[in-house]
Image (cartoon, grey):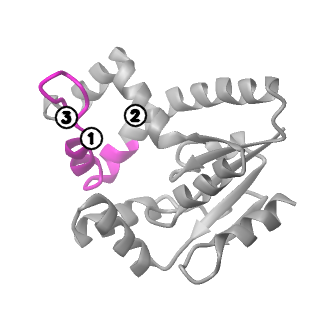
Amino acid sequence: MKKIAVSGGIGSGKSVVCKILRTLNYRVYDCDSRARILMDSNKAMIETLSLEFGEIILDCEGNINRPELAKIVFSDSEKLRRLNEIVHGEVRADLEEWFEQCRKEGCERAFVETAILYQSGLDRMVDEVWEVDAPERLRIERVTKRNSISVEEVESRIRAQQAHVVETPHSHTVIVINDGLMPLLPQIESLLH
């Protein structure tokens, strides 16, 4: 079974590529949603995060207040690194179980959607990387509309992600252009054949 990461910075269009893959009946593991599920269901992780970042990150029911946590970690690279360190181990273990399930089901390919491929260590778990790319101005426009946050907040998140760009990318990396001009489906179909 081929394991493929779909990666790219915030607003690049990873999710659009993954929606197309799901429509084509491929299995896709969404790291962000799985991390949220794990953060909500793992009481030990919630406690660790609240000790690390303060009780301000908890809502009135004791769950993680994601916008508050995002404000903290996207303005401090060390805090972002610490958050990732706490969460990534759990996500990697969960992903390994998911890969095993896909193998048992006879999947030819299994995809992983992730914005932080290298920082999370997921690059070492996949055979190939599809790097989704779009112009920064378009990425900012997409995220401000989608998340109702300021341009400055989006730029801060982009800078935080760019701080972790590696000099040597995965040895099997291909670029998927999502600039709103070049159609995605033909690019994806070409990569699948």
* In front of the other: 54 or 180: 180
Q: Residue at x 53, y 75 (%)?
A: 134
Residue drawn at (60%, 53%) of the image: 18
Q: Position of residue 42 (x, y in %)?
A: 39, 18
Front position in the image: 129 or 179: 179
Q: Which mark sits nearer the N-terminus, 1 or 3?
A: 3
- Indicate the quadrant where residue 126 lies: top right
Q: Going 25% across and 56% down the picture, which residue do you hit?
A: 75
Q: Secondary structure at mark 3?
A: helix
**Apparent side of residue 35 relative to residue 168 in the rendered image (left or right):** left
The first of marks 2 and 3 along the sequence is 2
**Whole-percent x and y of residue 74?**
29, 54
Residue at the far right in the pictured view: 193
Residue visible at 63% across and 54% down in the picture: 6
Q: CA distance from mark 1 to mark 3?
A: 7 Å
x and y, in percent, of residue 147 in the image? 29, 58
Q: Which residues are magenta?
A: 58-81
Q: Secondary structure at mark 2?
A: helix
Cα separation, mark 2 vs mark 3, equals: 14 Å
Quarter occupied by residue 122: top right
Q: Quadrant of the rendered structure where residue 108 is?
A: top right
Q: Is residue 165 above or below residue 124?
A: below
Q: Contact, CB < 8 Å: mark 2 with mark 3? A: no
Horizontal side of 121 relative to 147 (left or right) equals right
Is 113 displayed left or right of 70 in the figure? right
Residue on which the image places disc 2: 36
Q: Badge 1 is on which residue?
A: 66
Callout 1, which amino acid? Answer: Arg
**Which residue is under mark 3?**
57
The reply to whether the magenta stretch includes residue 76 is yes
Would residue 147 appear left or right of 59 to someone viewing this image?
A: right
